[in-house]
Amino acid sequence: MRTNKPIIGVAGGIGSGKSTVASILESLGAGVISSDRLNHTELDSPEVLAQLREWWGDRVVDSQGRANRAVLREIVRGDEAARRRLENLTHPRIDARRRQMMAEFQADSRIRAIVWDSPLLFEAGLADACDYIIFVEADPATRLARVRQTRNWTEEDLERFEKMQKPLDFKRQRADYIVENNSDMDAVRREVESIFFRILSAAETSCG
């Protein structure tokens, strides 16, 4: 999966704003591969929906014919076997689509770098293939406020899902760059721009 364009992994805690940083990188000319977006697409695919129905009944499909994510979250909550069954269904499909997008971005001269925005960057082994990793830092109160607003999560929900991932210290220590993302979006953009152009410069030097 190697390319001659730098691969940048975006890591951080839940609600830290990883997708915000990825979006800034995209605006600067990077091609972004979002695991959340790919997962969303795959869950709604006819093949996956048919399998979910076979396993767990019609309740897993909402009135618009899409995957009922609230029901799926309840099914896998605390049920390791159900969670792994779901992951074994969707992850190979997501990986295939990721590889396809990598090839498309590699062939596109307008794309200056490739960004992997994945909640499981380390857990899925994707970090090993990254040339650079950006860790998005946000304090716990800020992250909790964000997931309450965007996902209707409680503090217990946030703690439970974070325990399924590598500790934040583990991710932070393996990052090449750290971006603070608590409130000032102008400052975040300036920092991300600075990091991006440093990465591009380093990549050009190593290729030259």
Image: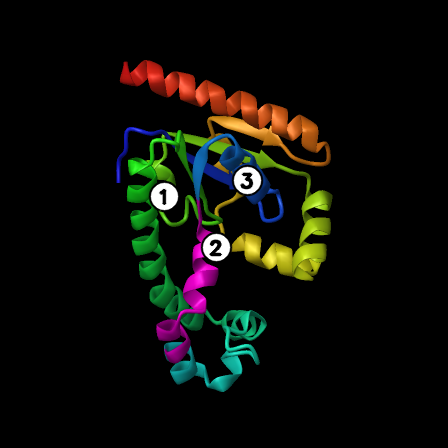
Q: Earlier along the polypeptide chain: callout 3 or callout 1?
A: 3
Whether tag 3 and tag 1 are in contact, CB under 8 A, the answer is no
Residue 35 inside the magenta-drawn segment: yes
Residue type highlighted by circle 3? Ser
Left or right? Give the position of 158 relative to 117: right
Residue 125: give x, y in percent of width and height. 35, 45
Q: Earlier along the polypeptide chain: callout 1 or callout 2?
A: 2
Residue 159 inside the magenta-drawn segment: no
Left or right? Give the position of 208 relative to 180: left
| Crowd around label 2: few <14 · some 14–19 · many ≥20 (10 Å) | few
Q: How far apart are marks 2 and 3 (CA)?
A: 13 Å
Q: Name which residue lies at 39% across and 64% down.
A: 87
Whether tag 2 and tag 3 are in contact, CB under 8 A, the answer is no
Q: In this view, does 154 lie above or below 135?
A: below
Name the magenta segment's main secondary structure: helix
Q: Which numbered mark, 1 or 2, is in the foreground of this view?
A: 2
Residue beneath disc 1? 126
Q: How far apart are marks 3 and 1 (CA)?
A: 19 Å
Q: How far apart are marks 1 and 2 (CA)?
A: 16 Å
Q: What element carries label 1?
A: helix
Residue 200: give x, y in percent of width and height. 41, 21
Left or right? Give the position of 50 relative to 144: left
| Mark identifier at residue 37 | 2
Q: Is residue 93 above or below residue 162?
A: below
Q: Name which residue lies at 73% across and 36% down.
A: 183
